[in-house]
Amino acid sequence: MDFGTRLANARKEKGFTQDDLEKATGINKRLISRYEKNDTMPSIDVARKLATALQVSLDYLTGLDYSLFINDPEMTKLLKGYEQLKDEDKAVIKKMLKAFSFYSKIEETQNNMA
């Protein structure tokens, strides 16, 4: 997926029109449209403004990281507080996520065997 498609998807997931994104960033909606069509690429400063307004990472917009785009406001809020947790609490969270992931794989395997 290219930058323009990611930008458009993130904008729509946020429930923004191009007008809304213009208001949030100060970037002209015609220019936003050109970014979404991949007619031109934004500077790093402009891309950062877009990412901030859409609450996604620059890595997501540029295709470097799929894992940071979570379309769940409650989870996003929880993840933003992660860095303030104690190291032992972070370790517990990591163990829990690994356990859920492992369980999901087992469940998927069982379903495929049935």
Image: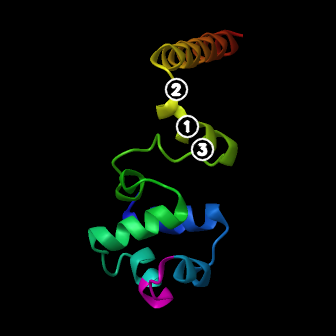
Please name the amino acid that badge 1 sits on: Gly
Q: Which of marks 2 and 3 is nearer the N terminus?
A: 3
Q: Nearer the viewer, residue 79 or 11?
A: 79
Left or right? Give the position of 83 relative to 75: left
Disc 2 element: loop
Mark pair 2, 3: CA separation: 15 Å
At 62% from the left and 49% from the top, the residue drawn is 71
Left or right? Give the position of 96 relative to 83: right
Mark pair 2, 1: CA separation: 7 Å
Q: Where is residue 70 in the image (x, y as percent from the top left)?
A: 57, 45
Tell me if I can see residue 55 in this picture. yes
Which residue in the protein does label 1 denote? 81
At 61% from the left and 37% from the top, the residue drawn is 78
Residue 85 tag number: 2
User: Residue most toward the left?
Assistant: 43
Disc 3 element: helix
Q: Is 65 drawn above or below residue 37 in the view shown?
A: above
